[in-house]
Image (cartoon, rainbow, N blue to C red):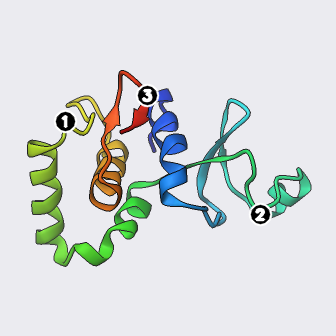
Amino acid sequence: MDTTETYIKMCEKALPDIGGWAWQDGDFGYRNGKVIVWNHVHAEKNGWGTGEGCIPLFRQDQSQEMVADRLVGLQTVCAVIYDFAITEGEGAGITINGTMEQLWLAFVMHELHGKVWSAEKEEWT
């Protein structure tokens, strides 16, 4: 799971476009400078409610679910993400040192919202 400063910023800045996040037990997040694993009992106990103040850190499978209707079969998934990484990756702010979480979130933002990550500005443009 990517918990780098870059990925945390990517997730935080993607949230307005992605919309509200329905937290489920086991989701990863970032709150008050710490990576957390969501647990609804702990969240209620600490007054987090439905996740206010928490940044969801999307797992690779969660990003894939966001674009699942555009992908059919493993071969298609591999071909599409490979093509995106080769043709759009660097332009989408993804470098060879990026993670699969970063690559898939960049793909989601590119496909669904027409945005790319600007490492320089630290925002989706």
Answer whether residue 3 is visible to the viewer in this image. Answer: no
58 vs 32: above or below: below
Q: Percent from the top left, x then y, of residue 93? A: 27, 34
Q: Nearer the viewer, residue 85 or 15?
A: 15
- Per the model, the C-alpha gap separating discs 2 and 3 is 31 Å
In the rendered structure, the answer to whether residue 89 lies left or right of residue 125 reads left
How crowded pointer 3 is (Cα within 10 Å; few <14, some 14-19, many 20+) is rated as few
Q: Percent from the top left, x then y, of residue 81? A: 18, 56
Q: Name the residue beneath numbered marker 1.
A: 91
Quadrant in the rendering for residue 60: bottom left
What amino acid type should be assigned to the residue bearing mark 1?
A: Gly
- Name which residue lies at 49% across and 59% down: 18
Answer whether residue 52 is visible to the viewer in this image. Answer: yes
How crowded pointer 2 is (Cα within 10 Å; few <14, some 14-19, many 20+) is rated as some
What amino acid type should be assigned to the residue bearing mark 3?
A: Glu
Q: Percent from the top left, x then y, of residue 44? A: 86, 60
- Per the model, the C-alpha gap separating discs 3 and 1 is 14 Å
Q: Name the residue beneath numbered marker 2.
A: 40
Choose mark 2 or mark 3, whichever is in front: 3
Q: Name the residue beneath numbered marker 3.
A: 122
Q: Nearer the viewer, residue 123 or 6?
A: 123
Which of the two discs, 2 and 1, labels the residue nearer the N terminus? 2
84 vs 24: above or below: above
